[in-house]
Image (cartoon, helix red, strand yellow):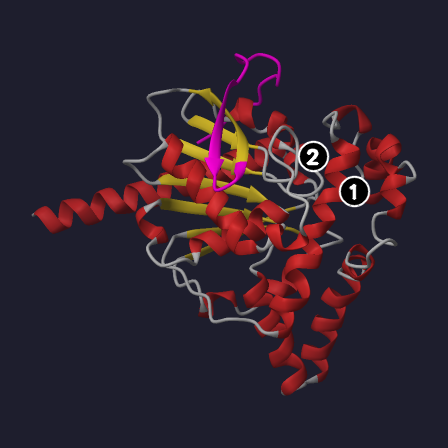
Amino acid sequence: MTYSAKDSHSIRPAVARTVRSGSVELAVFEQGNPAGPTLVLVHGWPDTHQLWEHVVPQLTDRFRVVSYDTRGSGRSTVPTAVSDYRLEFLAQDLFAVLDAVSPDRPVHLLAHDWGSVESWQAVCEPGAERRIASYTSVSGPNLDHLGTWLRAGFTNPTPRGVYKRLTQAVASAYTVLFQTPGLGPLPFRLGMWRIWPTFLRFFDGLDPALVHPAPTLRSDMITGLKRYRANIRPKLRHPAERRTTVPVQLILSTRDRAVRPVGYEHIDRWVPDLRRREIPAGHWSPISHAADLASLTMEFIDAVSDRDSEDGTAANS
């Protein structure tokens, strides 16, 4: 099936609402076909729901598309404590959105970067398969899976295994800076937010004209670093056994400088229902390869839905 690209300004404006998750209020936005299946989009750092502005137009004919500003970004509440950004709270936020927008039917999920990390936390929760029909993950690993993979390679080392892990470690070296209080936020306090489209041109090869930062970019950059401090070291030092029966599609960006495909090497140990697809993109593929992400997500949803229909027919025959 072929899906044509559409102008990001050719669709109706999103309908905004607020969803409460504990003490946090989340800004939620809905577009598209109100009679279609619900597809929830989760952005990463340092983005807001606006990350998906080039993806959403590809989806709105078929889907009721829901996006939201995750805690600490955009129009949502900005907690101050680092501990408020632990993955269990971020997963609770996602489930609060799901309960609000689709209380009676499971939704499909597409997530990028930290949105993907947060969504991994959610899909590995007990009973997640009753609330999430499929999950497409882009450029964001399950930190427990990554921690287990890293530790296994250095516990029983082989030259090839050590090389792969060093490759990911080098790619992730920036996260050490991001976790350093005072030093981590410094570039963003000094004005990196002013040159963000230009930085993405050099880092990711993006056309700056496609990059439309939110007005809250500076604060989103600084606050978002609390995610790194709250989660990376604890998860990599003490990874938990995290499994899911939710159907998962990994979209691997082969030019991603931050998240290398090798980090997903053994993921089928924890995700039995897994599909892998590759695109020749850098890290910010929702901007550079929006049509590819939309097409692959729709194909995966169709495959999962067709299989579920066949299973239901077989069960009733």
Residue 255 seen in render: no
| Residue 29 numbered mark, or none | none
Q: Main secondary structure of the magenta part?
A: loop
Which class describes the residues within 10 Å of circle 1: few (<14), some (14-19), or many (20+)?
Answer: some
Name which residue lies at 63% across and 28% down. 75
| Residue 204 numbered mark, or none | 1
Which class describes the residues within 10 Å of circle 2: few (<14), some (14-19), or many (20+)?
Answer: many
Q: Label 2 sits on what residue type?
A: Ser
* Quadrant showing the N terminus: top left
Where is residue 17? Give x, y as percent: 49, 23
Q: Disc 1, disc 2: CB below 8 Å?
A: yes
Q: Is residue 158 left or right of residue 135?
A: right
The first of marks 1 and 2 along the sequence is 1
Tell me the quarter of the picture where residue 142 sits: bottom right
Q: Label 1 sits on what residue type?
A: Asp
Residue that numbered label 2 is attached to: 288
Q: Is residue 256 above or below residue 171?
A: above
Q: Is residue 11 magenta?
A: yes
Q: Is residue 44 above or below residue 5?
A: below
Residue 60 seen in render: yes
Name which residue lies at 75% across and 25% down. 215
Q: Is residue 130 above or below residue 236?
A: above
Where is residue 97? Give x, y as percent: 44, 36
Q: CA distance from mark 1 to mark 2?
A: 9 Å
Looking at the rendered structure, the secondary structure element under dot 2 is: helix
Where is residue 228? Give x, y as percent: 70, 55
Looking at the rendered structure, the secondary structure element under dot 1 is: helix
Where is residue 43? Give x, y as percent: 60, 39
Q: Is residue 70 left or right of residue 174?
A: left
Q: Please state which of residues 91 and 37 is positioned toward the viewer in this rendering.
A: 91
Q: Which residues are magenta?
A: 1-24
Name which residue lies at 85% across and 41% down. 188
